[in-house]
Amino acid sequence: MKPMTKSMRQMRLDAFIKGLKNGAIKYVPRKGSDSRIDWSKYDRAQVNELRDMILFIRNVVDRAVVRLGLNEGEVRGRLCGILS
C-alpha cells in the first residue's frame, strides 16, 4: 500500500468530517463508553498541576541559590538595572 501524503490524509479527514456533519456518515459511539467529560474537574486538575509545577520550580531554584551560595536578595543579570 502506498503511503498517503499529508495533503491526501487531510483531504480524507476533511471529507470524513463533512460526511459526519451532513449526516452521510452515521457516528456510532463505542458500547459501554461513558465518555462524558466533567470539564470543571478537568480544569481543577490542570490548575493543581500548574500549581504543583510552580512549587517544584520554586524549590529547585531555592536549592540552586543555596548550593551556589548566592544572596537571595541580590539582583543579578539582566534585571539588575531594572529592579535595583
Image (cartoon, helix red, strand yellow):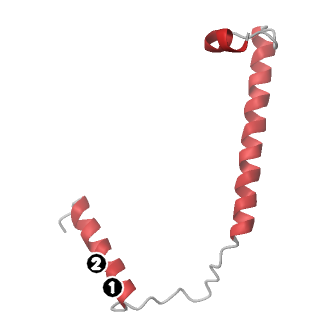
- Dot label at residue 19: 1
Query: For the N terminus, which image quadrant?
Result: bottom left
Q: Position of residue 43 (x, y in %)?
A: 70, 61
In the image: residue 51, left or right of residue 7: right
In the image: residue 63, left or right of residue 2: right
Residue type at numbered disc 1: Gly
Q: Secondary structure at mark 1?
A: helix
Mark 2 sits on what residue? 15
Q: Position of residue 57 (x, y in %)?
A: 73, 32
Residues under numbered marks 2 and 1 in contact, where contact means CB atoms less than 8 Å apart:
yes
Residue type at numbered disc 2: Ala
Query: For the C terminus, which image quadrant?
Result: top right
Hey, which quadrant is residue 70 in on the image? top right
Q: Position of residue 76 (x, y in %)?
A: 68, 9
In the image: residue 44, left or right of residue 8: right
Query: Where 16 sits versus 59, above or below?
Result: below
Residue at 73% of width from left, 67% of height from top?
40
Q: Position of residue 20 (x, y in %)?
A: 38, 85
Q: Nearer the viewer, residue 28 or 43?
A: 43
Residue at 57% of width from left, 89% of height from top?
31
The outermost residue toward the left is 2
User: Label 1: few (<14), some or many (≥20) within 10 Å?
Assistant: some
